[in-house]
Image: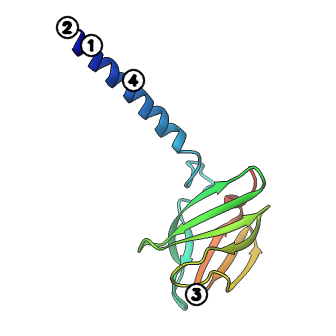
Amino acid sequence: MKMPIQVVLCAAILLGAAEASAGQQDKSPGPSADANTPKSIACAQETGESLGQCTYSVKRDKTGKTTVTVVFANGFKRHLFFNDGTFLKANATMSGTGTDTAWSLKDGIHRIRVDDQRYEVPDTLIAAL
């Protein structure tokens, strides 16, 4: 009789641990439910291509550094690095070094070019909380 009770008890403990772990993993890696936070950002992967929409995730640390990871529809990812709200650089990828960049901030939008790609990142995504 003790075996079924132990199995149920183990399953309940494991289920509780899995739910707690899932809650801890969602620290803010993506768009929030806030109405002011966009679900996607404007982006273009090739020179001359019209801006489309890309998904993104955001990571912040306590020192003012923010990383916005932009994901194109084909799965290509680019990390954009900011410090205290200022664009610093992008990561190197197979399609480019990430060092050929230009950027500006106008009307609350960071317009960023990295290699042949373009991004429009709202300042609200990278502003310190």
Pointers 2 and 1 in contact (CB under 8 A)? yes
Identify the residue under disc 1.
5
Q: Earlier in the sequence, mark 1 or mark 3?
A: 1
Residue 27's place in the image compared with 104, above or below, is above
Q: Dot 1 surroundings within 10 Å: few (below 14), some, or many (20 or more)?
A: few
Q: Earlier in the sequence, mark 4 or mark 3?
A: 4
Identify the residue under disc 3.
116
Residue 105 x/y as whole percent: 76, 74
Identify the residue under disc 2.
1
The mark closer to the camera, 3 or 2, is 2
Q: Residue at x 56, y 53 (%)?
A: 29
Q: Which mark is residue 105?
A: none
Separation (CA) of disc 2 from disc 1: 7 Å
Amino acid carrying label 1: it is Ile
The mark closer to the camera, 4 or 3, is 4
Separation (CA) of disc 1 from disc 4: 12 Å
Q: Dot 4 surroundings within 10 Å: few (below 14), some, or many (20 or more)?
A: few
Identify the residue under disc 4.
13
Return the residue found at the far top.
Answer: 1
Amino acid carrying label 4: it is Ile
Q: Is residue 124 left or right of residue 74?
A: right
Secondary structure beneath dot 4 equals: helix
Residue 88 x/y as whole percent: 74, 72
